[in-house]
Amino acid sequence: MAKRRAGFSVDRIPGATQYTQHWVLYPGYYPPGPSFIGALDIIASPTERPYASLADFFQNVPWSQGSTYVRVDVQQFTGGPLVLSSLAPFTL
């Protein structure tokens, strides 16, 4: 089973429910789904400290050939998926 690994930085104001996540998916990354359920191996900052800013993340995140950059715009809810089913683009 191949590992899936991701480095990330969250550009988020404390308490915000809408924010952006920035991920680097490394070679061998497999998204969770019916054919793969494995542990998420998150690569920490190479300096062993949180990234100070998005610019710091872009400058210092480990990158190798075959890596992929992903930007995710998040809208966070406190209700579970059944409560939010009317907002989902699919039927639960």
Image (tube, helix red, strand yellow):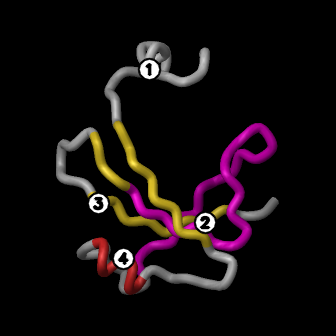
Residue position marked by numbered label 3 in the rendering: 11
How far is mark 3 from mark 4, CA to CA? 10 Å
Q: Amino acid at mark 4?
A: Phe
- The reply to whether discs 4 and 1 touch (Cβ–Cβ < 8 Å) is no
Residue 30 place in picture, x, y as percent = 71, 57
Quarter where residue 68 is shown = bottom right
Question: The magenta stretch spans which residues?
Answer: 21-45
Mark pair 1, 2: CA separation:
30 Å
Please tell me whether mark 3 or mark 2 is closer to you in this view.
3
Give the camera-side residue of 77 and 91: 91
The quadrant in which residue 60 appears is bottom left
Taking the view exactly as shown, the residue that stands out farthest to the front is 89
Which numbered disc, 4 or 2, marks the residue that appears first in the sequence? 2
**Residue 32 shown in magenta:** yes
The residue lying at 25 percent from left, 54 percent from top is 12
Measured Cα–Cα span from mark 3 to mark 1 = 24 Å
**Which mark, by number, is residue 57?**
4
Q: Sequence-wise, which precedes: disc 4 or disc 1?
A: 4
Q: Position of residue 38 (x, y in %)?
A: 69, 51
Identify the mark at residue 5; answer none if there is no mark.
2
Question: Mark 1 belongs to which amino acid?
Answer: Leu
- Quick one: label 3 or label 4, which is nearer the N terminus? 3
SS class, disc 2: strand
Per the model, the C-alpha gap separating discs 4 and 1 is 32 Å
Q: Is residue 88 left or right of residue 12?
A: right
Which mark sits nearer the N-terminus, 1 or 2?
2
Amino acid on which the number 2 mark rests in the picture = Arg
